[in-house]
Image (cartoon, helix red, strand yellow):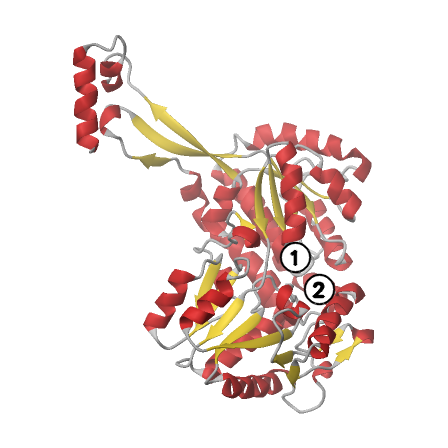
Amino acid sequence: MSATTASPTAPTLLPPPAVGTLPVLLAQQQARSAVLRREDATARAARLQRLHDWITRNREAIQQALYQDFRKPATETDVTEIYATQAEISHALKHLRQWMAPRRVGVPLALLGTRSWVQYEPKGVALIIAPWNYPFYLAVGPLASALAAGNCCVLKPSEMTPGVSALLARLVGEVFEPAEVSVVEGGKDVATELLSLPFDHIFFTGSPQVGKVVMRAAAEHLASVTLELGGKSPAVVDATANLRDAAEKIVWGKCVNAGQTCVAPDYLLVHESVRDALVAEIRGVLARFYQPEGGSVSESASLARIVNGHHFQRVARLLEDAQRRGATVAVGGSVDQTQCFIEPTVLLDVPLDSAVMQEEIFGPLLPVCTFSTLMEAADFINARPRPLALYLFSGHDENQRYLLGRVPAGGACINETLVHLGHPELPFGGSGNSGIGRAHGHYGFVAFSNEKAVLRQRIGATGIKFFYPPYTPKVRHMVDMLLKYLG
């Protein structure tokens, strides 16, 4: 079977409607969702398996699309786009029957004789708006959760990654009926039209600024939302940390995907006593990672590029502004507009009012700030919007507990960066400005599901009838006894 041939078990496929007929597409999916609502785990699993198999057959095409869009190394694509997606699908396949099964709950005293459970049902038709930074994983991962929950989906890829956008359109066209899953390509005008439609759930990954637009649009139809946003995620390195180990993990977390990662370490908070030693370790790690045989970092085949000229200029301006305000480049600093290349750069003595300390960087710039006490570090972070991730590098358990207990964040890693994102049993999402709702594994399944509360009462005499009117002294005495029991 060739890489472009659909599975023999795939449905007869029709081209998706044109953009001008998006209400028609939504109506088709709304009708189809009534059928999917009645499907069992076997039918849902078959749909997920077709998706999994297509990805396996088209590994090289996915690599090529990511390279086309921002020269992402094939190995990095394998790990952060293909493996991460396949792991999400495989986890759903393994646990789907368990997730779909009604969940029994206990019975309170006043409702003795009843049986109750939570029944999971699909929300209906979901809109998934994917970002450009991980354009395959952050499109297909949520899609897998939506399909596991039994929904129909419209997928809107980012126009900034046209190679992956076209690939996703091909994937969906070969694997799904348009009434079940459709890709709608286009720019801001298309996204605006989609957001005007009454979807049952919207899953958006992107910036907090656009997240607010999505939430306002969802409010018009009282649609539920999952907003996977971002922010400035700090990495705290205390005096007890293993600096070599911390440097390796921080550099990898910062430089994978050229820093264009929502949970990348945005800035370092380093104990003042180890700042210079840590910077020296980071300098050595950067050389080992991206200059193993000498030469220029820009020649490294292991480093992606900034996605386009607009974002290159944005990150370059952050670097220029920081230097103009007095920051020192300790490592890196070179840029090449012709390649949309920005060298991994460590900045010292960065003024707190500089743009690089005010905006989410989304590039390979790493400002370094210092602290003298853990309270000072916690206060520094808490004075800013809640981060999507918090990274703690420490060899002291009490220091770890102190910061975990005092710094709100969407998620956290101790002596690591990024990889909590890939743990299928952990919920992923933000807090406050960094997001609403949770994704991945069972949490993703629940995000796309309505948790229907069901109570089954027996016919005839029931406990609750003791409290029916008229409210005689006997009834009031029963209420008094019940409240006394609860007290």
Query: In the picture shown, does residue 267 fall above or below 225?
Result: below
Q: Which of the 4 quarters of the picture holds residue 392?
A: bottom left
Indicate the secondary structure of the residue bearing disc 2: helix
Query: Residue visible at 64% across and 58% down?
Result: 57
Q: Residue furthest bottom?
A: 294
Q: CA distance from mark 1 to mark 2?
A: 8 Å
Residue with the mark numbered 1: 136
89 or 485: nearer the viewer? 485
Give the percent coordinates (x, y) of residue 83: 56, 62
92 or 324: nearer the viewer? 324
Q: Is residue 188 left or right of residue 361?
A: right
Query: Residue visible at 78% across and 49% down?
Result: 187
Quadrant the C terminus occupies: top left
| Disc 1 residue type (three-letter) | Phe
Q: Earlier in the sequence, mark 1 or mark 2?
A: 2
Residue with the mark numbered 2: 66
Give the percent coordinates (x, y) of residue 237: 46, 76
| Disc 2 residue type (three-letter) | Leu
Q: Is residue 286 left or right of residue 393?
A: right
Query: In the picture shown, does residue 77 fall above or below 218?
Result: below
Mark 1 and mark 2 in contact? Answer it, CB < 8 Å.
Answer: yes
Residue 31 visible (yes or no): yes
Give the percent coordinates (x, y) of residue 32: 63, 30
58 or 364: nearer the viewer? 364
Q: Residue furthest top?
A: 470
Indicate the secondary structure of the residue bearing disc 1: loop
